[in-house]
Amino acid sequence: MMTLSTYSTLARILTADDPLAVQIERCLHVVRTDLPDLDVQITVWGHGQQRVWSTSDDVLWDATRTAQVARRRQPLIFDQQATLLPTSLSLPAPRLEPPSERSYMGLPVLWEGRLWAVLEAQRVGPFTSGERTLLLNLSPLLATAVGEEQWGRLARPSGTNDLELPAQRAIDQLAQTLESPLELASLLDVVLREAMHATKASSGAINLMDYEHEEYSLAHSIGFPAQPGASGERNAWPLAVGVVGRVARTGKATLLTDTSHGPEWASPQADVRAELVIPIHGPQQVLAVLVLATTREPVFTTEDLYAAQSIADLATKPLQRALEYQALIEVRTQLQQTLESLPLGLALLDGEGRLLRTNPAWFQHWHIDPRRSGDLQYVPWDMLPLLLSRLSHPLELSDFFAECQSHPQKTFETTMRLQEPDQDIRLRSSPVLDAHSTPNGRLVMIEDITREREIDKMKNEFVSVVSHELRTPLTSILGYTELLLARDFPPVERQEFIQTVYDQANQLSKMVDDLLSLSRLDAGQIKLSRWVVSLHQIIAEITRQLNETLSARHRLLIDIPANIPPIYADKDKIRQILTNLLSNAIKYSPDGGQVALFVRELRTPPPDAPNLPKERAVLIAVRDQGLGIAPADLPNVFNRFFRVDNSNTRKIGGTGLGLSITKALVELHGGRIWVTSTVGKGSTFWLTLPIATELARRS
Ligand code: ADP
């Protein structure tokens, strides 16, 4: 009983690396065991001799039949049921009745149009269909094995091909095409198309081997339902799996004529009749495996196998070249992307300081237009004219590079301050070594450390401000409570002391609140609970509180139209914003004057307004007639811990936190805040807040 496993055993034996004699002996042994009714004889010509192997010495073989098959190169069959043979084979009509009851089949084993062997079989009674299939499929496998004995592996040095091959001309042309360097995708396409054309395959695919990951992947296919990478499938399989894996491991081409069976040959197309699986060899390992499939009759022949292998062999060098090129391109692209996205500026200089390469961050950090980079040959000399206005000490930069040049082996580092815009930078220059470890250039890095510096500065300021500001109220609280504990004071005086302690404790508590608000704002923990809010109501509440603390020198003016639309806001936060601005206005007008609060619906932005959001908004202005803020200090008033430092303000207590909190809260509402001021005349703080429209409420 012929089974698929018999066929795969035979296929394995005939594609193994053993000598032909051993392969044939093993095959016959398998036939003896698995198909005991069948007698098989194999006659091989080559190397000037004829060799004959058979399953049994007891069976008589008619040498004239063998000669007939060899001469005609056509199958010769005597079988009671010869009509059942596949119609694809152009079989001669059944001959005269054989002398015995035995059926006979003789098949030529052809290789490139030449006859190398004859495979014969006999049995009592008709051949079973399994036996017929086996014998027909065994013939091309034998052809491969015999062919390999003749020439070693199918690859032959070019020029020794004196055989007639229908695809030979196409192959010669292909060789020329492949001479020119091709990138991987085009190369795979050319090779696959040529191989399909030469073998009349209906579909084909090329798999690339990845030995590092022990897998192979579909790199290109034509005519298969699934395209590489289509539908997000992963087109990669372990090397240990399937006939492609086997061909990659053994390096031997395989012709499969019974692809409808067996898991190893599972084909994505159900109607595939035969497959050619061809290795493309590299210097050590198989680089790729070509799979050619046909759905047509007649199925592939050994000539097709040879033609496909010849094409595959031609592809070896170009494929190796294309794969190496591809790998280089990938490494280069990765490196380039890394350098381009690096926030660090890099410049590669030769021994004379000539600029060889830079990344985009290099010119960005210097604030030099990259279009001018063509004029910049020597670093830093050609850059100096462009940087002069930014350097407070131009010699600093040239000295640094001069020092680097006089000590080519050493690494140097320095920090510098640039102006317009203000920027702190760190420069580091380290030697670049050639293959003999001799320095032949430098790699210079520029890093923007402005933010780092600012954070350092802020930390220092924070510690000094907080320790000072907390200490002041604490000192007076401690002083007064100590007094109160030590002695009895008359009630009026005691009341005064207690009031001072209370005020100072309040101040402390406010400061701690500010610090907490700030850290929660930084951590993004402050969430607004927004409602439709009437500004009338909030302002009424605030003025009531303020009026209680207002000295006689200040006048509070509130100007809010009755029809002002409600805003969409967090009531408590709006109260905090307005209280901060109004109490600053009072605090920074020590000589008194008017403190005014205007509310209008925003129609045209005031002259000094920044870019304002397009939504409908109200405009609020808090105006005082106090100290004012000098133009140089104006941009900083919203920075945390910033306090204007002059003889007037020094007397006024504060932390420099109020306005930074106010700004963060306004912006959290989607509003903007800014300030205009004239020293000695007073300041106006402006802010916008979104009106409660249907849209705003729903978002
Ligand atoms: P604080 O008032 O606690 O110092 P702020 O953040 O509220 O902190 O204000 C920062 C700085 O801005 C103040 O120190 C002050 O110099 C200045 N400033 C704020 N508001 C006014 C104002 N209305 N008039 C003049 N200067 C002001």
Image (tube, grey):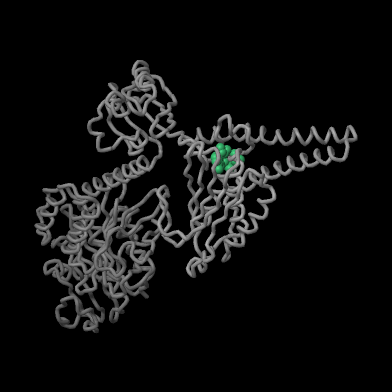
Tell me the quarter of the picture where residue 588 sits.
Answer: top right
Tell me the quarter of the picture where residue 193 sits.
Answer: bottom left
Q: Quadrant of ligand 1?
A: top right
Q: Residue at x 13, y 52 (%)?
A: 177
| Residue 190: x %, y % from top left | 19, 57
Q: In the rendered view, does 519 fall on the left or right side of 308?
A: right
Say which of 448 and 52 sits in front: 448
| Residue 618: x %, y % from top left | 49, 59
Q: Residue at x 11, y 60 (%)?
A: 165
Q: Which image quadrant: the N terminus?
A: bottom left
| Residue 575: x %, y % from top left | 61, 55
In the picture as drawn, the residue positioned furthest to the right comes out as 488
| Residue 597: x %, y % from top left | 55, 53
Q: Residue at x 72, y 44 (%)?
A: 506
Say which of 369 and 89 sits in front: 369
Tell me the quarter of the picture where residue 86 sits.
Answer: bottom left
Residue 196 appearing in the image:
yes
Q: In the rendered view, does 676 fall on the left or right side of 93?
A: right
Say which of 97 and 244 sits in front: 244
Q: How many marks?
A: 0
Q: In the rendered view, does 552 fall on the left or right side of 260?
A: right
Q: In the rendered view, does 287 fall on the left or right side of 232?
A: left
Location of residue 489 with respect to 27 vertically, above or below: above
Residue 640 appearing in the image:
no
